[in-house]
Image (tube, rainbow, N blue to C red):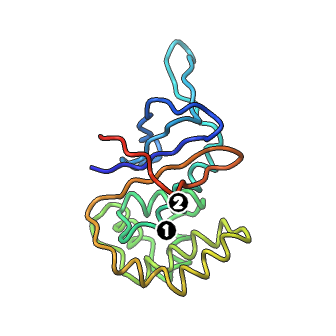
Amino acid sequence: MKRENFFRPSEEVRDPYHYTACGLQNIYLLNGYDFGEHDGERHVFIRSLDALHQAIGRHLVLKRKALTGAEIKFLRKTIDLTQEELAEALGNNAQSIARWEKGQITIPGDAEKLLRVVFFARLTTEEELRALRDLIVDGLVELDAFDEDVTPCASFTLNETWTEQARPVAVCC
């Protein structure tokens, strides 16, 4: 199984922390996290959590062929939309969104492409606007050509912001 790694370049790379609190099973942090005690229990503290979620979301909308239910839910929550609000943005109904997120049915291709655009539009910077244009012009056609059954690895670094690296750090599960 492949996994996605995220780390901060200014920090020493540590043993991967399997970050499942986001609802996705293939996310690993290589730094940007600390362990601490609170009320006698050990907890993990993630730095720049919102920025990390945005970086993971960008990876999903730009690199994944087909979004899983967990990934759809992650994207929706990252841009702070209810199922009803997302349904309205996609021209659908909340029950369909719930069924996609539970994996009961697959999201139709057009709705999935529009979800990618909605996600990107909610986090838009100048650089991302160019990437969005490229996604619309070229990227979605390229995504159709991908043949993947497993989520590919991705590596992210936290400096000022979480950024995807060109080459993933390969660590076996």
Q: Quadrant of residue 35?
A: top right
Helix, strand or loop at label 2? It is helix
Residue wearing tag 2: 57
Residue type at mark 1: give it.
Answer: Val
Within-10-Å neighbours for mark 1: few <14, some 14–19, many 20+: many
Image spot of residue 159 (x, y percent): 67, 44
Which residue is found at the position 42% from the left and 49% from the top? 4
Helix, strand or loop at label 1? It is helix
74 versus 108 height, above or below: above
Image spot of residue 165 (x, y percent): 54, 54
Q: Nearer the viewer, residue 53 or 8?
A: 8
Residue type at mark 2: give it.
Answer: Gly
CB under 8 Å between discs 2 and 1: yes
Left or right, 139 with reference to 157: left
Give residue 103's mark: none
Which residue is found at the position 64% from the left and 50% from the top? 51
Quarter occupied by the C terminus: top left
Which residue is found at the position 65% from the left and 68% from the top? 122
Which residue is found at the position 57% from the left and 20% from the top? 36
Residue wearing tag 1: 61
Q: Nearer the viewer, residue 101 or 18?
A: 18
Disc 2/disc 1 C-alpha distance (Å): 6 Å
